[in-house]
Image: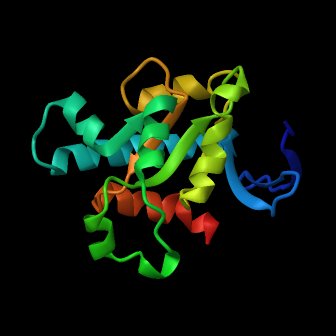
Amino acid sequence: MSMPITASRTAITGEQVSLRRNSFPQPTICYEGEVLDRLLTSIKREIATARNSDIPLPEKLWFKQQFSVGVNEVTRVLERMPPIPANERSLLSLKLHSTRLQVILRASDCHPWLLTKHLESLANSKKVPVVFVKDKKRGSLRLGELVKLKTAIAIGVKDKGNQFNQFISTEILHTFE
């Protein structure tokens, strides 16, 4: 077991690169402080907008269609996702396959960290970016607020091709490019 070693970190975006033994550096985004506050506020606003513009469904059912909540559910969806090469990421190939995750939001205050250790490598194998939410000891509380729960250690955003997914692409995923 080797712990990640932080090689560099930028203060503006909160982006960091972690290096693991016998692996190439993989980019990881870590939001904290004022940048995290702005991101979570804009995500809440976009969730409310998308919820109002979609077909009227009960709130729990709508959240279930848009998000995978919890370490077990995110792991289950990741394991069932077939890997899609970058050159085949078309709308048709997304429709042919089962549910895909667009991004995983993970609280960095999870203890013991072994509960979520597997998510990063599994997400990397399926080409799903992982975004760490770092807020002292409140990261899981902040993520829980997004999906109207008390706490959430991990949230997977399902790729449905809707307005909310476009927001995630422009606001979060542009830093992975």
The spot of residue 86 in percent (x, y) is 51, 76
Q: Residue furthest top?
A: 150
Q: Is residue 129 above or below residue 39?
A: below
The residue located at (37%, 58%) in the rendering is 165
The spot of residue 14 in percent (x, y) is 73, 51
Q: In front: 13, or 126? A: 126
Does residue 29 appear to the left or right of 65 in the view shown?
Answer: right
The spot of residue 145 in percent (x, y) is 44, 27
Does residue 110 appear to the left or right of 105 in the view shown?
Answer: right
**Total numbered labels placed on residues in the image:** 0
The residue located at (62%, 65%) in the rendering is 175
Is there any visible trace of residue 109 in the rendered image? no
Is there any visible trace of residue 91 in the rendered image? yes
Name the image quarter holding the N terminus: top right
The spot of residue 140 in percent (x, y) is 57, 25
The residue located at (64%, 26%) in the rendering is 115
Q: In front: 131, or 78? A: 78
The residue located at (29%, 42%) in the rendering is 48
Colour convention of the picture: rainbow
Q: In front: 132, or 48? A: 132
Q: Residue furthest bottom?
A: 87
Q: Is residue 174 above or below residue 29?
A: below
Does residue 169 appear to the left or right of 37 in the view shown?
Answer: left
Name the image quarter holding the C terminus: bottom right
Q: Is residue 98 above or below residue 175?
A: above
Q: Quadrant of residue 19?
A: bottom right
Q: Is residue 12 above or below residue 4?
A: below
